[in-house]
Amino acid sequence: MLMKRIIVCLDVQDGRVVKGVSFRGLRDVGNPVELAQRYEAEGADEIVFLDISASVEGRHALVDVVRRTAEKLFIPLTVGGGVQDINDIGAILRAGADKVSINSAAVARPELIGEASARYGAQCVVASIDARLERRSIEMMAHAEAANTETKPVSRNWYRVFTHGGRDATEMNAITWARRCEHLGAGEILITSIDQDGQRTGYDLELTGQVVEAVNVPVVASGGAGSPEHIRDAFLLAGADAALAAGIFHDGKCTIAEVKRLLASSGIPIRLAQTASPLP
């Protein structure tokens, strides 16, 4: 049985780790290299490094920070933000990253996923999807009319894909896009709920579960973790393969070891955290 993974996310802006709510109100929480080392020592299974302003500013990822971070880690490192083409992906992997997360550039040119998968392997390609919940009653009524069925208002959840750090809306459905990313060659899907991001009220389990059902590659739940129980639910209720969290670890709300003890007691296969003292 494959082990479930706890992934710590480092959102980086101007060389510093930051955290906000629903991608807004960012505050400084530390040095990315030091935090990556600390979380590895505390038992994180992977680190995700996201240069959150690179795509918005139209620049490349901070490869020098990636290199300094990768040099200190023995666990997998995923890097995203500012990835514009196949050359950027190669530069990030050469800097020491194990995987590259692609979001805005893949939406703009989906072929990039296939190119990266063909050149570097699907295991190196993570399709990152930022999604927001919408209600589509009007659309459902239109479908009903077209099918000559009753036009009684029907409401269902529909998740819209956003790019450029949650700023730009698309006309894409997140579940459909996740399925296409897998077909193009992505080896993993990172699904983030913009609505839940930083709220600490739990992951969007419906969103995560729909993606899990739609694809056959590992799915990482992201956005909303506020307690060890929320992380447990992402595995037990939504079927995620990994859970990504940031704020609860940055602010000391709980430790990775505490989370893993709960997961183990709940029968979830997990690599238990080591007992070594964390780095200062």
Image (spheres, rainbow, N blue to C red):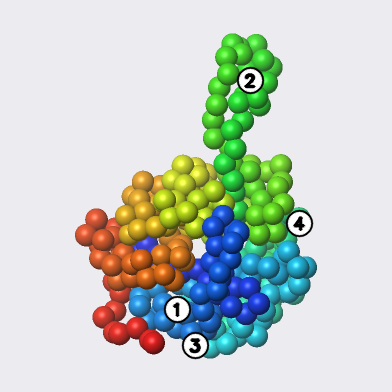
What distance separates the C-alpha of mark 1 from that of mark 3?
A: 9 Å
Q: Quadrant of residue 121?
A: bottom right
Considering the numbered disc 4 on the image, is that residue within a helix, a strand or a loop?
loop
**4 or 3: mark nearer the eye:** 3
Q: Residue at x 73, y 74 (%)?
A: 60
Q: Nearer the viewer, residue 19 or 106?
A: 19
Q: Residue at x 70, y 69 (%)?
A: 54
Pointer 1: residues within 10 angstroms few (<14), some, or many (20+)? some
Q: Amino acid at mark 2?
A: Met
Q: Does 205 sit above or below residue 219?
A: above
Q: Amino acid at mark 3?
A: Lys
Q: Secondary structure at mark 3?
A: loop
Residue linked to disc 4: 109
Where, quadrant-wise, is the C terminus in this rendering? bottom left
Q: CA distance from mark 4 to mark 3?
A: 33 Å
Is residue 150 at all visible to an observer of this figure? yes
Residue underneath mark 1: 75
Residue positioned 45% across, 78% down in the render: 75
Estimate the x, y position of residue 49 in percent, counting from the top left: 56, 72
Going by the image, does 165 lie left or right of 248? right
The amino acid sitting under disc 4 is: Arg
Q: Is residue 238 above or below residue 66?
A: above
Per the image, the residue denoted by label 2 is: 141
